[in-house]
């Protein structure tokens, strides 16, 4: 693709030779002639002077460089859109593999691909253009929309409800039993998990993440939510639209997330917390109380980030502060 054509596709401002032939994309450290790369993080800005790429996607204010540039407000998103042009994902022909087990009461839409050793239970409904790769299991009564894509060993449990364009990466489990036990004199008594998971459209759940079914009613995952590897969503929780849960996040039961929440890696939230719209929790933060909308929180237990940083700065000065206090005490 000619660079001028690519710039038009991305709606970016081109600086440089529009006749350059672009053959692929790469990271800024690995890119070579003919390839496109990007800079979204300022710490990589010096590499723009040495990269071998033929073109770099940058923000509009980025300093001029010898290499051709495409200037656009969101370089990372533009790079993702460019990558879609040069990378073709595997395609799967419609059909049901001979080793798959599909219950006679299940209903599959048009153009579905059902791979080897897939199991689909009774009264399951799956929409058009679904892809179920080997060893996927869908329990009885599950209802799934169009363009469902389940990678190998993903599981959808009984009576769960998934919208259109849902992607489950390898080993994702939707609707496993919530962790509910009541203690008596003999030990722990299991509480039946009679609910389900209700998931909206355009949701992706990545490898080995688990979204538990509710004890009663439903665990809710709204449209556009993205859930990373090894995330645990406890029973009865609610996740608002477009929220992002990074790797190893853990939500205890009945946690409520608003819209556009970002929980960075290893954030933990205690049961029955409400986290408002637009909240950002930085890595390894521990949340035990409600968080008001729009805050960025840090630490254990999580507090507003500026307060945490001020407290942290004082923490490292404590030896000096104690020393001065002792001096003052002796003088008095």
Image (cartoon, rainbow, N blue to C red):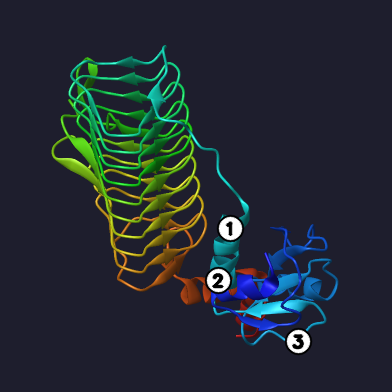
Q: Give the label on residue 85, or none.
A: 1
Q: Is residue 306 above or below residue 271?
A: below
Query: Horizontally, is 138 left or right of 229 in the view?
Result: left
Q: Earlier in the sequence, mark 3 or mark 2?
A: 2
Q: Is residue 33 above or below residue 113?
A: below
Nearest the camera: 32 or 238? 32
Q: Give the residue at mark 2.
A: 9
Q: Give the residue at mark 3.
A: 64
Q: Position of residue 322 (x, y in %)?
A: 63, 73
Dots 1 and 2: beta carbons under 8 Å? Answer: yes
Quadrant where the C terminus lies? bottom right
Nearest the camera: 181 or 144? 144
Query: Horizontally, is 90 left or right of 51 in the view?
Result: left
Q: Earlier in the sequence, mark 1 or mark 2?
A: 2
Residue 132's quadrant in the figure? top left
- For marks 1 and 3, give the CA distance: 26 Å
Q: Nearer the viewer, mark 1 or mark 3?
A: 1
Q: Residue furthest top?
A: 99
Q: Nearer the viewer, mark 3 or mark 2?
A: 2
What residue do we see at 47% from left, 47% from top?
A: 228
What residue do we see at 65% from left, 85% from top?
A: 331
């Amino acid at each position: 693709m000619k660079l001028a054509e690519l710039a038009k596709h991305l709606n970016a401002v081109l600086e440089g030779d529009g006749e350059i032939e672009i053959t692929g994309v790469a990271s800024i450290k690995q890119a070579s002639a003919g390839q496109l790369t990007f800079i979204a993080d300022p710490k990589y800005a010096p590499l723009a002077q040495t990269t071998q790429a033929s073109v770099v996607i940058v923000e509009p204010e980025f300093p001029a460089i010898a290499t051709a540039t495409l200037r656009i407000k969101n370089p990372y998103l533009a790079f993702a859109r460019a990558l879609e042009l040069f990378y073709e994902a595997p395609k799967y022909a419609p059909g049901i593999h001979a080793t798959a087990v599909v219950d006679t009461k299940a209903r599959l839409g048009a153009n579905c691909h059902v791979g080897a050793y897939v199991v689909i239970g009774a009264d399951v409904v799956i929409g058009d253009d679904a892809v179920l790769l080997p060893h996927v299991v869908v329990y009885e009564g599950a209802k799934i929309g169009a363009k469902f894509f389940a990678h190998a060993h993903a599981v959808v449990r009984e009576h769960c409800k998934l919208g259109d364009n849902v992607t489950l990466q390898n080993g994702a489990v939707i609707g496993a039993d919530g962790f509910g036990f009541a203690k008596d004199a003999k030990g722990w008594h299991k509480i039946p998990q009679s609910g389900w998971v209700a998931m909206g459209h355009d949701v992706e759940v990545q490898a080995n993440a688990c979204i538990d079914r509710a004890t009663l009613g439903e665990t809710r995952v709204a449209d556009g939510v993205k859930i990373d590897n090894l995330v645990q969503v406890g029973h009865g929780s609610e996740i608002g639209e477009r929220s992002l849960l990074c790797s190893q996040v853990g939500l205890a039961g009945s946690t409520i997330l608003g819209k556009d929440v970002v929980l960075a890696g290893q954030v933990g939230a205690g049961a029955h917390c409400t986290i408002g719209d637009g909240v950002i929790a930085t890595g390894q933060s521990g949340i035990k109380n409600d968080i008001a909308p729009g805050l960025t929180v840090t630490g254990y237990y999580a507090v507003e980030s500026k307060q945490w940083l001020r407290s942290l700065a004082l923490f490292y000065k404590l030896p000096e502060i104690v020393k001065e206090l002792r001096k003052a005490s002796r003088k008095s």
